[in-house]
Image (tube, rainbow, N blue to C red):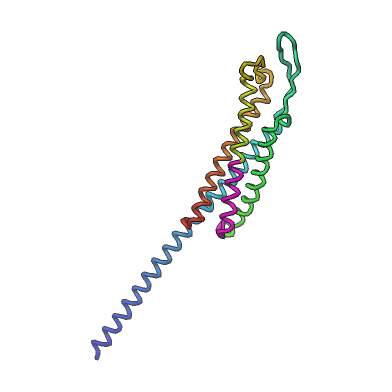
Amino acid sequence: MAKATEQKKNSITVGETKLDIRDVVTTTYDEDNRHGGTRNDVAMVVLRAMCMALSAVSLLLMVTACETSMTTLYGFEFQLHAVWSLSDSLIYLVVVTSATVIYSLLQLVLSGTRLMRKTHVVPTRTQAWFCFVADQILGCAMVSGGSAALGVTNMNRTGIRHMPLPNFCKSLGFFCDHLAISVVFALFAFLLLAASSILDVLRLSGDC
């Protein structure tokens, strides 16, 4: 009788020990998931902040691209007045970068608030899909706008082949430099939007 009671106590102790081990493993797994999610949430906030900053710099450089100068063609002097609003390609890039700044700012405020509250930056799959689609649309618009503006900048520097047009950037150096730097920042912003899209895909796949 005493041996049976002792064996019963031992089995209860073993069962409690196994239960405790399972609890420890489950807790550790949950903590690892939470830490992994936190790292991805922090990465998302950083990407939003960097994208907003680069887009804002690109926008500021573009809207301040304005210069008046003189150039000589066939021995005659002409006054050149260059401003971004005279080109449809540059106007398109300004619109796209403005939209990206506003979108990134809103996402940064929402993400930062949720991160400080220690909740998921993207709490639902619906919001993850929205962020993914928005990042894709703005990313494609940003790279297309940057490419179009790059063509305008290159034409200003090289002129038009088989036509007697001078290198306008010799006389409009300030204007051309602003355009070139603005396009570079816009393309970097596109890369950040692409990185945000990758995090959106990971969220949708359930890996983070």
Which SS type dominates the magenta stretch? helix
Q: Is residue 43 above or below residue 167?
A: below
For residue 123: magenta? yes
Q: Residue at x 71, y 33 (%)?
A: 63
Residue 196 percent location from the top left of the image = 54, 47
Q: Nearer the viewer, residue 61 or 8?
A: 61
- Relative to 53, 29 lies left or right: left
Residue 68 versus residue 106 in the image, above or below: above
Quadrant of the rendered image containing residue 139: top right
Q: Is residue 41 left or right of residue 106?
A: left
Residue at 40% over, 70% down: 23
Residue 56 sits above or below residue 82 on the image: below
Magenta segment, which residues? Answer: 118-140
Question: Image quarter for residue 72?
Answer: top right
Which residue is most to the bottom?
Answer: 1
Residue 29 figure quarter: bottom left
Q: Position of residue 105 (x, y in %)?
A: 65, 48
